Image (cartoon, rainbow, N blue to C red):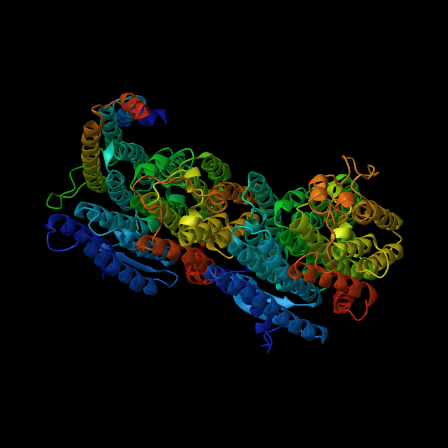
Amino acid sequence: MGELALLLAVPIVAAGLIVAVPSRRWSPRFATLLVLGAQVGMAGWFATRALGSMGVRQVMGGFRVPFGIEVVLDGVSMLVVLLIAIVAFAIVWTIRSGARSSGFYGLCLLLVAGLTGVAIAGDVFNLYVFLEISGLAAYGLVASGRGGKGALSALKYLIVGTVGATLYLLGVAYVYVVTGTLNMADLAVRLPEVAGYGSPAVLAGFVLIVVGLGVKVAIFPMHVWQPDAYADAPDDVTALMAALVSTTAAYALLRVVLDVFTVSFLLANPLLHDVVLLAAAVSVIVGGVFAYRQEDVKRMLAYSSVSQFGLIAMGLLLATETAVFGALLHLVGHAVMKAGLFLAVGVVSLTVGVRTVDGYAGLVKRSPVLAGGFAVLALALVGIPPAVGFVGKWYIALGAIEAGSWWMLAVIMVSTLITLAYVARLLERMFMRDPGPKEDGLDGLVTLNATSVSVLVAAVGAVALGLAGPWIGGLVAPAIEVLVGA
Amino acid sequence: MDRGLGCTGDRGVGGSMIMPDAWLPGLAVLVPALSAGVIFALSKRPNLREAATLGAAGGAFVLVAWIVRLVLAGEKVALDAGVLVPGVRLAFEVDALGALFALLASGLWIVTSVFSIGYMRGLKEHAQTRYFASFAASIAATLGVAFSANLVTLFLFYELLTVATYPLVVHDETDEARAAGRKYLAYTFSGGVAVLTGTVLLFWSTGTTSFVNGGIGSVAGVNLGLARVVFALLAGGFAVKAAVMPLHSWLPNAMVAPTPVSGLLHAVAVVKSGIFGVARTVLDVFGPETMHQIGMHTFVAIGAGATILVASVIALQKDNLKRRLAYSTISQLSYIVLGLSVLRSEALVGALYHIPAHGFMKLTLFLCTGALYVETKKKNISEMAGVGRRMPLTMLAFGIAAAGMAGIPLVAGFASKFYLLLGAGDAGAWWIVGVYVTSGVLNVAYFWPVVSQAFFEEAEADPKPLIDHPMGGQAERDVLASRTPLNDAATTGFHRVPVGREASWLILGPLLVTTLGSLVLGVAVDSAVFMALAEQAVEAVMAP
Amino acid sequence: MIDVFAVRFEFVAAIVVLGIGLYLTIGDRGLVKKIIGLNLFQTAVFLFFISASLRDGGAAPLLTESGGPYVNPLPHVIVLTAIVVGVSLTAVALALLIRIHDAYGALREDVIEGLIDDG
């Protein structure tokens, strides 16, 4: 009864304690790792219970559905909760002890709590609250670097992010005014019954919600905050954000579109459906082209995220079983790949002091192992089989054909080439040029520390996830059937 | 959604029977793949590293030979490694066609490895570890392509092959090499994307991508327009690596790679994986009957025929020997494609036999070119006057292989061309016969200048017809003349050295072996295992 | 649609405040004003939400009172929570402004951009 709330309570309470208790005699990093370890354990334990078709639903505080606050863990949210816990653990593990204040670790835990809340929220308003909790933590983390630039980017991120979240809230208000409920499952029933899918208020609600979440996911043209925030945040924070924040927002988009508005809504409004698909497709192409034109590696990877999330949005908006699973798999895979890539960027910047594409010349001679891991991750991103990038793309492409959407098939295939273009540009410099000068005072050699190990683990994970794709598909198939079939 | 997201799908290949020899193809791919890792680990000890290459090459060859023996005995060697994506398994199944390609690639890898050692050490090349490791990885991917039981598995290894060969193309790390590498990636990945699109469409419309000799049964039921699109995407995608014009232009640029790479990969493994893909598409996805229905083979034939002639004419104009060979490759590869498009038994046998025949002959030519470069640093035909006196065995081998290319009897090229002509005549496609004959003449025209330069010209030779650049081997004449009074360098520009001492045996041995191979394939056609495999493959397709 | 606005003038007010807030957030170069605009923007949404709960002649939904039409309590709860979220956001934003002021000595976007460009 209500034990799912532990997933939220444990990191939040721990965040408070870590900040409040003076840390002279214990290591906040170690404590955070303990908490995150417990979180991984809990997520794993709940995941085994959530594998049934309906998942676990629990109402807080003894209220009845649909009035109480409901949390839901089904096959889909279980994947995201596990991902959040594991990736957060891996990234915090790479932070050198003593490098960060206890406030930083508190924010990390708060971020984990907020994101987990987004993943398991069962009503649209709590989704907003958790979105903002994770947002607050993310703004703080982006600003945690030295200097004013991080703070400025964080403020930009805060303004755009808040506008997005408020638009989402406005959309929720519309839907609430029409239906009188906020519970997702209840909304799915009452939207067609009370208002009908064609009602202007419902349409306005949908548009506002999709735009609001689109800002958080960083779909073009709502992506303006993202490259700055990624580029100016400390490297470990960038890895954390790139892996988890947009990922969870995309998950929220999936939840709201498929669980609240449902496939029938999309079918009832073909024009709207086409417009949102087109927006996603434009994001895929434009994000990729921008990525190709970047000189700063972090910015390149940031724009790459814009492109990849366009692909994910496309998959989930296609709303066929295959495409949604493809989007989900790519969501998880992308998180692993980007976490690894940004961690690698962090190592390089720390040891060699370079951040530009040209600066990466000859990286393989400085650290063959790190360069190898980087190459595997980058090629996985392109979609070279058998890595996860390929498997996700295969499902999304198959879904596009099932939906009879030939132009989307073309976009998916072209996106492969665009991804290749910017990835190859970087890899060519890393492997086929002599090393350039390094920054003074750095040894320029990458040693095998926790971060490079994490990069390698991510590389192995990207391939393993690809091979395990069909197996994961079997696990989450019932949940996706419910999502799409409803 | 009938296919579901779970672990369902066709129960692999050849039923659920567990084959005692199932591990053979997996092992044959793993040996070179793992040896790439070993080679990296041994980067500080070159001799051991090269031993690893040779060991892996030998091991892979023995495994493949074992598989070939089983295939010839009529057994199917299959390995099922689980679900790749639902409905598609990561599976190997070796039939005669796959065995033929695998035997060629693994056999020639041994020869090329020996040559590579001589070449890389002779030139004191940089990044030798990366070179040998990428080479091993490329062979692993090639064997994977040969063994694949379905299009998705084939695509997987096809893309890995691109990745593995990229470092070899860019080996020099000059701006020219990097530009060539970019072009290589752009072309081959675009082709790969087309193949993937075709594969997804095929899977969606038929529910399978597994190869079936003679064509996937359900493909006949697919809407004609869609079938045409699928065929165009698959064949067009594979045609990029097969260097069919106008998708060929990466190949001449890729000649900046070290010569053994050009020899084994860009005349045998990589380009023939494209050919192999086309063959799989024509024979084992669509099958001759459906091919006739969708009627695309005429377009393929026209494209291939035009490529044969145009590439030959371009080859005439190239003075750089490797580039001339590259255009010759483009032309000869389309022999195979053209043969496939005829859809007659004899032509198919000829086309499949041309895969090893061209492999042996073209590798010989490239190895000769490499030997010339190591010993004399000459790259252009116009500088080679009299080189036959300096390197008689090498140039003799070159002459034999070139004769084979032109289709002169007793060399491998004659046998395959004979069958190709027979098939074309049988089909009544006289223009195809005309293309083959014309191309034979053009082959003579572009190879003869090399041979005549080597053996019959001296430094002050007159400008040759058919070559449009200043002729003559005046390059180092004066220097050499003053330094070595006892040889005929004064007249030829080259020293005379004792027979057999013209180059290191690491270099000379391999090219003589491949020459011998070209002759055996031309003389003892029936006892050469390749013909048996080609015939078995065609039989399986034509009489399913 | 029009008559809704005629009866529910709160909706009109909400839209006006929303417009002002959005304009300040996007159009003004001063960072402090942007934050003020952001607050206005949020407040407008709260106003919209809370006015949706209005019911003519409704009483406060207290169980001790005698029955009768109540106004909907849920939006109040929601807006209360949203206000807390908004306050925390403003707090974080102001903290960031202090950091920015420490670093650049200015709080106008164009001035700071100029400083960054000059190095």
Task: Point out residue B467 in the picture as x, y percentages from the top left corner.
Answer: 79, 38
Vertical arrangement, residue B310 with respect to residue A399, above or below:
above
Compare residues B447 and C58 and report the one nearer the observer. B447
Compare residues A373 and A243 and report the one nearer the observer. A373
- Tally the marks: 0
Q: Is residue B392 visible?
A: yes
Task: Point out residue B208 in the picture as x, y percentages from the top left corner.
Answer: 61, 60
Q: Quadrant of the N terminus of chain A?
A: bottom left
Vertical arrangement, residue B121 with respect to residue C11, above or below:
below
Vertical arrangement, residue B345 with respect to residue B188, above or below:
below
In the displayed structure, does residue A131 sit left or right of residue A290?
left
In the displayed structure, does residue A367 sit left or right of residue B380?
left
In the displayed structure, does residue B297 sit left or right of residue C38?
right
Q: Quadrant of residue A453?
A: bottom left
Task: Point out residue A70 in the picture as x, y percentages from the top left corner.
Answer: 27, 53
Q: Is residue B12 visible?
A: no
Compare residues B472 and A93 and report the one nearer the observer. B472
Compare residues A437 and A173 and report the one nearer the observer. A437
